[in-house]
Amino acid sequence: MIRGVKIVSIPVSDQDVALKFYTEKLGFKVATDQPMGPGQRWIELSIPGSATSLALFTPPGHESRIGGFQPMTFWCDDVFATAATMKSNGVELEEEPRKEVWGTMAKFKDPDGNVFVFSSR
């Protein structure tokens, strides 16, 4: 049976720029960085404290997925504190934190214009 999510791919146009953003601004760690086909690398990042990994990889022919809202949500303990840390690290917030009836959420944008929700559990 399926037991969880192992890797989520984030579509990016420049792997070096994305790698710098996700490691330096968000604090993710490089788990794997190796060649994968012509002109690309398989870059897998770990999120400290999480079993899910992220891959900074865009399969050929899927470049249209780069930019815009991405259908995944990151979770954190405190959305307001996380947003403040992100902003101090130079991360652009697409939406400031706000409380909803179901919880607290905000959105951030990466260098490719990918937009992600982050919320408290």
Image: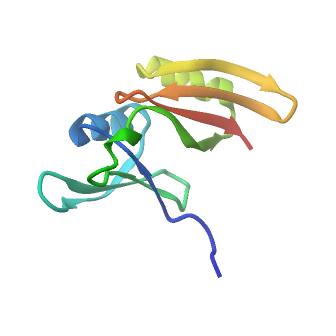
Q: Position of residue 100 (x, y in %)?
A: 82, 27
**Side (left or right) of 3 relative to 15:** right
| Residue farthest toward the right in the current orientation of the protein | 101
| Residue farthest toward the left in the current orientation of the protein | 38
Q: Position of residue 69 (x, y in %)?
A: 53, 33
Residue 114's image quarter?
top left
Residue 11's image quarter?
top left
Colouring scheme, one of rainbow, by chain, secondary structure, one colour: rainbow
Give me the residue at 79% from left, 24% from top. 99
Vertical relation: 80 (above or below) 57:
above
Question: Which of 116 and 90 lies nearest the eye of the viewer?
Answer: 116
Vertical relation: 55 (above or below) 111:
below
Q: Position of residue 113 (x, y in %)?
A: 41, 27
Give me the residue at 27% from left, 37% from top. 13
Residue 44's image quarter?
bottom left
Give me the residue at 84% from left, 36% from top. 102
Vertical relation: 24 (above or below) 51:
above
| Residue farthest toward the bottom in the current orientation of the protein | 1
Q: Position of residue 97 (x, y in %)?
A: 68, 21
Point out the image quarter for the N terminus. Answer: bottom right
